[in-house]
Every structure is written in C-alpha cells, then in structure tokens.
Image (spheres, rainbow, N blue to C red):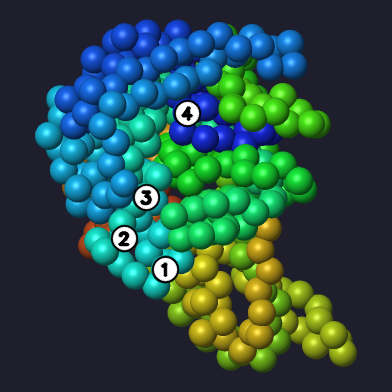
Amino acid sequence: MRVLCFDGQAGAAGDMILAALIDLGIDPTRLSDAIRSIVPATFEIEVESARINGIAAKRVHVRVMEEVKHRSLGEVLALLDRGDLSTAVRDRSASVFRRLASAEARIHSSTPEKVHFHEVGANDAVIDVAGSIWAMAELGIEQVFCEPLVLGSGVGRSAHGPINYPAPAVLEILKGRPVHYVADLGETTTPTGAAILAEVAQFTTTLLLTPERTGYGAGTKTLADRPNVLRATIGTLTDGFDSDLLWVVASDIDNTRPEVFDWLTEKLRAAGAVDVVILDVGMKKNRRGVRVEALCPAEQRQAIAEAILAETGSLGVRWWPVCRTKMKRHVETISTPWGPIRLKVAETSHGPRAVAEYDDCRAAAAQSGQPLASIFQTVERLFRDQQSGNIGLSLKG
C-alpha cells in the first residue's frame, strides 16, 4: 500500500503541507492550473528553495491579487462546487472546511453555517487546502498517517484580538489525537494545517514503513531548538498490515446490576465502539467488580464515556491511546444451502483466512434446525472449495 506519513515535530501549517508535497514531486504549474477554477482572483504559487538547519526544503508563497476579509462556510463550499476538481478532491476539501467551521462554532457558541472564516476563509487558505488534497491524489496516496503534532505556546494576534497558542480552534480540531506541547515556540500548528491532517490522516506513534522519498516544507520563522520543517515521506507499509490509532475507554464498576452490562455492551457498540470487553476484577475492600473496556476511534471517545457514566454506577472513566495493527480484510458473500451467508476474509501471507458471520449462521441454524457449529464448518468449507475452484463465484459482498 502506498502511504504518506507526516512528521510534525515543528508543527504544521497549510503552506508547509503544500510545500512538502511540492518537494515530493508535484509540479507547481499543474497544481495552479488544477485549482484555478475555484479561486475568484488572480494568484500565483511561488516556490523557493530553502535550507533549514542544513536541510534542503521548499517554501511556498501564495500571492493573491484580490483578497477577501472573511467568508462563510457556504461561500467557501460554493467556490469548491464551481470548480473543475474531481468529486473526491472537492468532497475531501469541503470536509476540511466543515471541520474548521465546526471547531469555530463550538468555540464561539454558534453554528457552522453562521461562522465567518477570517484567515482560514481567505483565498490563500482555500488554495492551501484544495491544493494539498489535489496533490495527495496526484501522488497516488492510498493512506495518510501523521505522527503527533507539536503545539507551541505564547500569545499572538487574531481577528478577535490577542489569542493564546495553541489557538483554540487547533485544540478543538485535534481533540482525541496525540500531540506534543513544547514551550516558547509560539504558533507551530495552525487551524488550517490541523484541519487538513485531521481530515486525511490517521495519527499514530508506531508505523513500519519502507521509505521511497521524502519532501520537506519550510515554515516562515526560525525555531531555536529544531528545524522549522514539516517532513512528508512516501513509502509502503512493510508488514502487510494496516495500522491505526484508537482509544481505550475503561471503568472499574462494583455497584451495578449484572444484567445492565448486556445492555451497556449494546449501547457502547451503537455509540461507535470497535470492541467491548467485560472483565472480572478485584476492587477495594475485597469487593468483586467488573472492568468495562471499550475500544473506539477518537471521535467516539466522548460518547463512549458518557454511555458508561449514564448506564452504570461509575463515577469516572479512564482513557488512553493505543496503536492497532490489523490484517487487511474484506467481506464476501457466498451461496449456501441456507441462502447467502457473509464471511470476513483476512489476507495473510499463506492465503485468505475466512470466518463466517455469526448473525448469518445463527439465522441459518434457527431456520434449518442444524447445529450452529455445523453451519460454521460447512460455510467455511464452501469458501475454501470456492477458493480452490471447486464451486462457482461468490456473490458481491
């Protein structure tokens, strides 16, 4: 799988992302031509070579002849709709701006539709976002990863007056994702940079990657303790597995009726939990209790915590990030004597490994009166026969 990994040890901004992608081989002229239809102004993308602490990098300057002070989310989306971008690039770019609008709305107690973008609605920001999304598609990237971004500190200026760094919008956008706080760096990660990476990338601290080539996007200021560059590396995953970052939300409970945990498990799965585990534990004063652990994406962490607190006697939950390595898999459906039945099929170095779906097999057992174990065995044997060419093709899964 062709992947792109960003290393944000100096943070990330929209122009740094764009510069790193240009350094990876994107032609600035083709980039300008691709996004010109969405920008209602004359502009130029100037690319200069820079040397940051001895590292050869690219720095991007977007020169816009007619700039705007602010735009609403609807106005930005209208610009994207009027252009010649592919559907995938347009939709992903629109999602970045919706993410920005949602963050601003939460900060200002408003709604995304009423938010007025200031810096992030300007033409240069539109170019940074749409240009970065277009460039990743042009490079043929199948999956994007990002190591924890560095967030600096200090006080700066915004359209609303003085502002603390990291900017509130940055923290809102990166909720649930791992970051590094480093003092006295000023603004390192901007809302635009955070929104692009939050939209396209899985944040991870562990990635087995075979690098092919690396690009460096230079920032505009000098940092005392590190080169101010965003590194982007194209490569392939070396282990044949997919990786992602999830969160464990857990609570130890000793004051809830046992029947509740069946209900709670369903609620947690409905709230977005990838997996739920109930464990017996020993608690204070030798009381027996249970530990509930729910595995979930960052976006569902708050909902998972609220479900545990609402449905049990728990007074608090714990959470921590975990990196997951998983086999590549897909769903296939095969014809059986009991009708179509789905299987999860994992890709391994020794060939496909299939497990029949429990719900489908249970329904077949209930209907036919056959033992459930027998249904599992027959379905998986039929799949193996199909793989060896003994029976017809599967239905589309």
- Disc 2 designates what residue? 115
| Residue 237 visible to an observer of this rendering | no
**Numbered circle sitting on residue 118:** 3
User: Alpha carbon of mark 2 to alpha carbon of mark 4: how far?
Assistant: 23 Å
**Numbered circle sitting on residue 11:** none
Task: Work out whether 37 lies above or below 161.
Answer: above
Q: Amino acid at mark 4?
A: Asp
Q: Residue 263, image x and y in percent?
A: 46, 79
Q: Earlier in the sequence, mark 2 or mark 4?
A: 4
**Marks 1 and 4 in Cβ contact (< 8 Å):** no
Secondary structure category for the residue under label 2: loop
Q: Quadrant of residue 22?
A: top left
User: Alpha carbon of mark 2 to alpha carbon of mark 1: how far?
Assistant: 8 Å
Task: Work out whether 237 lies above or below 265.
Answer: above
Name the residue: 30% across, 67% down: 111
Q: Nearer the viewer, residue 128 or 239?
A: 128
**Marks 3 and 1 in Cβ contact (< 8 Å):** no
Q: Quadrant of residue 359?
A: bottom left
